[in-house]
Amino acid sequence: MKDITKEQRAIVTEKSKQAGETLIPERWKWVETSIWTEHMLTALEEGVKGGKWYSLMDKVYSGRNLASAWEKVKSNKGAAGVDNQSIEAFQANNGKYLEELENRLKEDRYEIMPVKRVWIPKLGSKEKRPLGIPVVKDRILQTAMRNVLEPIGDNPPSWRLRRPLRNKAMDSDPDAAVKTRSDE
C-alpha cells in the first residue's frame, strides 16, 4: 500500500467537504451560497434548458435566504420606514418576523409597504435630494430577491469588469461612458 504524505493529506482535506457544504468555484464566491448550489451554478454556466429558469420564488422565500438577507440588511444599519420599525426593533423578534415574511411570500399574500421619503443634503451644495426608505421587511425581501436574481442577470458579473473603465473614461469625457458601452 502506498504511503500518503502530509502534503497529499492537506490537499485532500482542503478539497473535501462536509455533508451539506458546497464547493463554490472562485469566480462564484460572491453569490449567496444558501441558494446557489454547485448544481445550479453549473446550470448557470452551461445554460438552462429552454433558456428559462423556473421555480425561483421558492429560493426567494427560503428560510436560509431570508435569514441571510436579514443579516445583510442588519449590517447596513438603515433607518426605520413608514411603519417606524427600526432595525433594533426587528432584531428583538427577528425569528417571528422572518417566519411571518416567509409564510406570506409562500401564500402570495405579502404586500409591499409605501416608501418613506426624507430629504438629505447634497454633497457640496445647499440643496437637498430625496431619499426613499423602505420598511425593514421590504429591504429583506429586496435583498433576498437580489440574492437569487443577480447571478442570473449578471453572468459573468460584468459590472465588476467595466466599472473601472467607465470611471476612467468619465473623468476625461462624461460622454465616453456611453461611447464605451455602445462599442462593447
Image (spheres, helix red, strand yellow):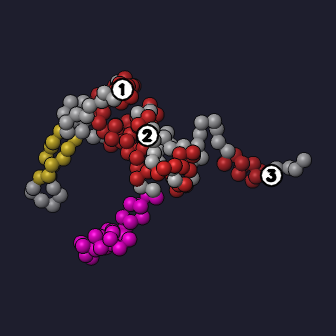
Residue at the extreme bottom: 172
Q: Which kind of residue does numbered mark 3 sit on? A: Thr
Residue in view at x 24 percent, y 39 percent: 134
Q: CA distance from mark 1 to mark 3?
A: 55 Å
Of 25 and 8, nearer the camera is 25
Q: Which kind of residue does numbered mark 1 sit on? A: Glu
- Above-or-below relation of 147 to 167: above
Q: Which residue is mark 2?
A: 56
Q: CA distance from mark 2 to mark 3?
A: 45 Å
- Above-or-below relation of 182 to 128: below
Residue in view at x 40 percent, y 53 percent: 153
Q: CA distance from mark 2 to mark 1?
A: 15 Å
Q: Position of residue 87 (x, y in %)?
A: 30, 33
Left-right relation of 47 to 91: right
Q: Position of residue 139 (x, y in %)?
A: 30, 39
| Crowdedness near tag 2: few (<14), some (14–19) or many (≥20) residues, C-alpha within 10 Å | few
Left-right relation of 21 to 76: right
Left-right relation of 13 to 167: right
Quadrant in which the C terminus appears: bottom left
Viewer can see residue 78 = yes
Residue 169 among those drawn in magenta: yes
Main secondary structure along the magenta-highlighted residues: helix
Total number of numbered discs in the rendering: 3
Q: Which residue is mark 3?
A: 5
Task: Give the SS element for disc 1.
Answer: loop
Q: Which residue is mark 1?
A: 107
